[in-house]
Image (cartoon, helix red, strand yellow):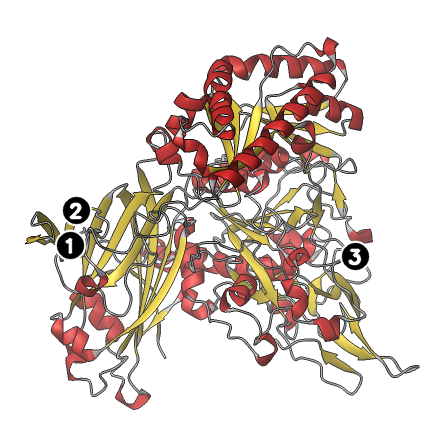
Amino acid sequence: MELKPHLLYSKDSEAKAEFIYKHRYPGNQKTDDEVELVVDDNREKRKSFEISMRSFVGDYKRRVSERVQDLGVPQEVIAIELKFHGLFKSNEFEKSYWTDFGLVPISFTDFNTRGLFLVENTEVFKGTFWDNLKRFVNNDSDYNRNLIYIKDFKLHTSKSRLKQYDIKEPVVYLELVDSTITKPNLVKPTIKALNDYLDSNGVVYSFNEFNQSYELKKPSEELVNNIARNFDAVHAINSYRHIVTFPNRYGVNVKGYPFTIVGNGKLPIIGVVDTGVSSMTPLASIIVNEDNSYGINGLNPLVDEADNGYGHGTCVAALAALGSQLSNELSAELIADAKILSLKILSGAYGVVTNSEVINLIKKVCEDPSLDVKIFTLTINYENSLGCNENVSEYAYQLDKLAFEYDVLIFISTANQGAELDLDNLNEEYPNHFKKSCSNLNSPAESMNNFTIGSIGDNLDKEVHTEGEYPLSSASEPAAYTRKYHLIQKKSNSKLIKPDAVFAGGNFSLSKWDFDDSWVVEPAGANAMKVLSAHEKDIIIEQTGTSLSTPLVANIAAKILRQYPDLRAQSIKALLINSTNKLNKTDRFKDFKDSEYRALVGHGIPNEERCLYSNENSATLILEERIRIGECRSFKLFLPQYLNDAEKNDGLLRFEVTLCYSFKPIKNNHLAYCPININCGIFKNVPLEIYDYELDRAGRNRKVYKGITGAGKDYYAFSEGWSQYQDGMDKSKMLSNVQKSRFYAKKSDIVNEENCFKITIGSHFHKLLPDFVTEILPQENEVSIVIRITDCQKKSDLKGKLYDEIRLVNKLEAVATASAEGDLEAEL
């Protein structure tokens, strides 16, 4: 098989049109969002409101009594938590809640069925909202009908603010009301007063004006409680600990370094955000740090003292640079695929580190003109797992913003299960232990613009099967320690997947104890993975963990970047996901729903060869575009004539289409965190926009769309349609910025469409967002699409012509490669 470079689809679109949703006509079945809300009868609702009102008044009096009078807090701000019967449609009701009730939303949770609202206008709140509640409770028919959407409500109390605060954690985060959505005088005086209060108490803190948030280092419990009770503009107080995803260690007794590492040519640089990378190892030859400037709080990035000198960042860096080379027979000289920039944020298992310190360190790299770093690894997560359906964390939010602004890709581990695992019973519990919420991934692994990685029980070597030791799971099953996506979607979007992929991370072993003939689970037994240690005496050790899988996938990304240095970060992500081999359920997972299994294994296992190369019978096209909101564009894709003479009809060509884009996230909005839907598809050879007029049941003329935009699937699609369902009436879905789809084209499809299909891209805002939010979002976005087309004829009938013919008939060029640039330099 001849390996060939991927093809760049750089042709202009053949047509542009307004993106039009499939039209809905009178008499059609309504979506869930259109069905009128059915609520309890008035008697039950009156009772619910009466309880809520009584509780609200009691909590308000208690809050007033607990205030400290001499703190200098400039004003009182009331916040109310509303629980709705269904989805709160911001685009329809947000304005009326402000004008009628004096309420402005701060955040939405539980798929936007719960909202935290600020009382911006006290007079309207008391005179209208509270007065309407009284009328409703008193069975007066004259009340504002928006009340019926509310199920119950309560005051946002000090206890509510402290819901995610843990006194054991050394860093505390204060989230303020966003001053851009309220009157400035409700927030700005509080900021000055809070600064004075923190200064007077000697608290070390930083304030992020853009995010309206504080980071406090080691504040006392009394001080935090005082802030919760007095500073009303602080609506949430959180505390998290950053902890290293430490693998389990098992020595293999290799002494001295039996190899050197060579970095030939111009290699991409991987930023390893970790515990440092030891320069006392062979990695020294490929470390690009020139000084200690890339360590926070004075830490030396070239020292890795974590885990009692065995290190962590050193292991991650070696896997990122060398891939699987340490798992095979070691040669005297190992060839690096990337160079390493060490960014040190911790020196031990955990420590005092803030989100802003991590973000600012990565930003510093991105803005350094002497460096060109597009790939990072991050295997330091929050210590605690996310709760089911919990909102995106501040940490993940800032990483998403960073990836969007700087066109970088951060490879993040799901984190390992540790204390959650009952090793004594794990052999019997596996895999049902994954169904527990404590198996959810740890922040910032929910980051959507970046790449999240879990583990399978593969060790990149032969599994050990002896009389006394066996692997706990197969190499193609989720590793016992990996973690799963925390979202249990109420309105399912099958494209919304985390982790993005899984990869080898080593396997737990089952060992037999001789003295009582019982079997025990060994987290780092003989089925673990060989890695490089920072320890001078035990340099090669065996470990297991998602922190091993993560740099191994980053290594493939580095190889993509080395092969195709001009690609965007999201194109690298699209190539990785497009290449994945789906991980099918084994018998042990037969009781898992498809969605539950997908939450463990993501899109599957990346295939390195497919990431890097096409071949004579399989062509990969890369399309990098920009598309405006509300726009739909189509591109012609011509198919070779030789396919018309193929004996095979069904499943002649396989199309694997992957779309990735980064976005500017919407903070504190559960459903519309990703505010734009960009999707694509491979369609029939029909016009982008075409319509006719027909009479409806009422005798009125209506448009009937029969092109790609605005029409039903039957008009434009083969077996697949758009990569993500984009019905504009469906506001209750979260959107995914990663979409992979696959379909087979028949020979008859190719002939009927005259050997021409259409690649089409469409874009629109999440329909839940009101205009004043969409107006400040980017109106144009970059998108990367990878299309792999494979000739599926039996081997004896393959002509070996697909790649060359697709390149010729579409007049495509190969993606610019580093080797091509090197050849040109040699000629010059």
Q: Which residue is identified by label 2?
A: 17
Q: Position of residue 122 (x, y in %)?
A: 51, 16
Marks 3 and 1, how far apart at CA: 62 Å
Q: Nearer the viewer, residue 24 or 148?
A: 148
Q: Earlier in the sequence, mark 1 or mark 2?
A: 2
Q: Amino acid at mark 3?
A: His
Kindly report which numbered mark, 2 or 3, lies closer to the viewer in this rendering: 2
* Residue at x-position 76% and y-position 48%: 349
Marks 1 and 2, how far apart at CA: 7 Å
Residue 481 visible in the picture: yes
The 10 Å Cα crowd at callout 2, few under 14, some 14 to 19, many 20 or more, is some
Element type at marker 1?
loop
Q: Amino acid at mark 1?
A: Leu
The 10 Å Cα crowd at callout 1, few under 14, some 14 to 19, many 20 or more, is many
Left or right position of 215 against 742: right
Q: Earlier in the sequence, mark 2 or mark 3?
A: 2
Q: Which residue is identified by label 3?
A: 535
In the picture, the quarter occupied by the N terminus is bottom left
Q: Position of residue 153 (x, y in %)?
A: 56, 33
